[in-house]
Every structure is written in structure tokens, then in C-alpha cells.
Image (cartoon, rainbow, N blue to C red):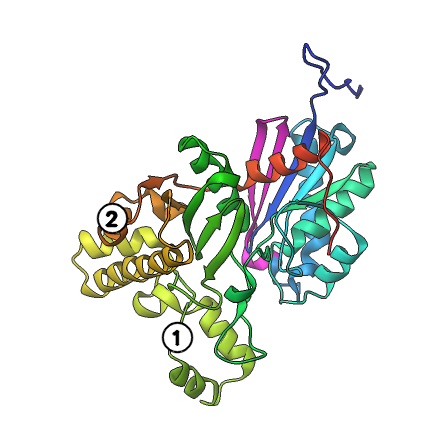
Amino acid sequence: MYVRVKRAKSDIGRIFMKVLVLNPGATSTKISIFEEENEVFKTNLVHHAADLAPYAHVIDQGPFRKQLILETVEKAGYQMTDFDAVCGRGGLLRHIPSGTYAVSDQAIADVLDPPYGEHASNLGVLLARELGDMAGIPSFFVDPVCVDEMTPVAHVTGFKGMERESFFHALNQKSIARKAAKLLGKTYEEARLIVIHMGGGVSVAAHENGLAVDDFNVKDEGAFGMDRAGSLPVNAMINLCFSGLTKQEVKKLLGSEAGAYSYVGTKDFREVERRAFEENDPDCRMVFDAMAYQLAKDIGAMAAVLKFQVDAIVYTGGMAYSDRFTQAITDYVGNLAPVLRLPGEEEMRSLAEGALRVLHGEQAKVYP
């Protein structure tokens, strides 16, 4: 028989909250359960191509993933009514400031008809709302990739009506920036940092006084990633667009078949590094060196944004585990500022922390 246990309280009467955290990816769904800051359960559900093939659009996968989540939660010994909130990864929504947002009807409308295209993370908003409503508890999303805190001048390009847009790994960037500031003996609001997220995608952002005031995102510009092109020469891009390919074919080519993959046929950075240095593969070595070179140039640009008053350069993401790669970047930029390396990602914890801040009294932001 199931008996719901009352929330435990600390010596000072603080209620301890439980949060279900969801992070949908292209071929997986990460699930974590937090009791306050303690992650008491985590798993990563892998979805094979055959499982996802029946769904024409990413958002159509909602019922399939929702059922898997419910089964996983039950197997872990929980029911949805055990939780105080559900927090999902935010997706390609409208541009908004950083923060924790309640999942509103408008947010649901925007993931069903996404203004900036389909992405698996859009499912995080939908699943959080549906599961939260099922249990009668609030649903949130935190720091989606569309966070925009860029200054007005940072949006300007060389052509009126074609403005720079902010898309970056806001969730991990913000979390890592706070940790880096603490290591420096500062608050995030006091720090001037350049954070480089290096994973399957890459982003470089200048953080000043609690805001990401400018950023490069591999979706549109900056250094190339494992399968995205980053900045490209304008005339060559025009030629590609008029080469006979459709708009969707060009987007697919530059969004998932470009970057390192277009040169060496792999999207795994570890394989690039292994082939470059253990097999002496000249193409992989060229890609390895070029990635470090381009990221260093982006860091230099963000240093200019901060008027070269930089408290630290911070490496994060999966590639930051590589001593060789981070040193290759530091060889270019090490004289700018101290370098901190905080590898990996803490997206699940960052989502939980955002939800907990609201559960303990901070006001949730209103979308849009």
C-alpha cells in the first residue's frame, strides 16, 4: 500500500522539497529526482531511431516520452504526487531574460508552433506542464537556449533588419559562471567572465555583472562545432544557397552535417583527438588545431566586449576534460586573464536549483 510521507523539515522548520527534472535530447531523455540539493535518482533513457521514426515532428514524441517517464518514476519508487514541482529543459522559445519561468499557456503554444524551429528541448516544456498538471503541482523551465541579455549595440549587424540573435548554452553557462565567480571570491553579479561551453555544440559568452551581455552561438556564428558550421564566408554561403539545394537541405547540411563532421566524418571529439595524436591523422590534427584557434579568436572578441577587464576565462562542457585541447586554447589566450577549467555539464542540477529557488520563495518569471 502506498502511503505519502510528509515533507521532512530541518531544525529551523524549512520544508524540504522534491523536484522531478526532465532534459529531453535528440535521442534520449534524462531524468533526475532531487530532494533539495541532493540528487537521489538519475537515469538516461536512450531512444533508438526505430522508436522515434513514427513521429513526423519532435513535439509529436510527447506522449511516447511521457509514458516512459511515468514508468521510470514508478520503478524508482515514486508517484507524481510525491513531487513539489516538475522542471523541464527549455527550448527554442521567444527571447527572454535569464531566470526560472512558470510554464504558461503561451509557452505551450510556442513549443507547439516554435518561433525558431524544432528542437528536442522544446519537449521539456510540454512534458513538465503535462506531468505537473497531472499531479496538481507547478511546472517550470529554466534558462533556455533563447535567453537574451545582449546589449542593444551587440544586436546590430552590417545590414538593417538582419539582427544578431542570442542562442547559447544559457543553462550551463549561467551555472558555471556562478561557480567560477564563487571560486574567485565574488558573486556572479560582481564578476566579469568569458565562459566557453564546449560540447556537441559550442558557445562563447561574455558575462558582466550578472548578465550575458554578448555571445557567439554555433547555430549562426563563431567557432565551428562537431557538426555545425559556425561563421562562414558570405559569398560562399550565397553560392551554396543557390546551388540547387532546398532551404531545408541547406539548414540540415549546416546544422548537422557541417563542422568537424564535414572534414573527418565523426561527431565524437574524443575520436578526433585520438586520431590526431595516436594515429597521426593530418586531417584530424588540422580540425583539432582549427577548433582551438577559432575558439581563441572568439574569446578575444569577448575580451574586447569586456574592455579587456576579465576576471577569468572559464572552460566547460565535455571537451573541457581534454588537457591537450584546453591547453591549445590557453596557449593563445592565457595572457588575457586567469583560466579556470570546470569540465562537464550540470544541467540537471541547474534545472533543480532554478525550481527550488522559486519553491523557497523567489518569484517565478512570467513568459514571454
Dot 2, crowdedness within 10 Å: few (<14), some or many (≥20)?
few
Pinpoint residue 288: horizontal percent, then vertical percent. Answer: 26, 58
From the image, give the main secondary structure of the stretch colored magenta.
strand
Q: Nearer the viewer, residue 66 or 306?
A: 306
Write down the residue under mark 2. Answer: 335
Q: Is residue 84 visible?
A: yes
Pair 2/1: label in front: 2
Q: Is residue 164 visible?
A: no
Say which amino acid is labelled 2: Asn
Say which amino acid is labelled 1: Leu
Task: Pick whichever of labels 2 and 1 is earlier in the sequence.
Answer: 1
- Residue at 64%, 60% (x, y): give it: 95
The residues bearing labels 2 and 1 have C-alpha atoms spaced at a distance of 28 Å
Q: Nearer the viewer, residue 86 or 183?
A: 183
- Residue at 79%, 21% (x, y): give it: 4
Magenta stretch, residue numbers: 27-51
Pinpoint residue 157: horizontal percent, then vertical percent. Answer: 49, 74
Tell whether position 227 is magenta. no
Residue 332 lies in quadrant = bottom left
Write down the residue under mark 1. Answer: 232
Tell whether position 30 is magenta. yes
Residue 150 lies in quadrant = bottom right
* Secondary structure under the numbered disc 1 in the rendered image: loop
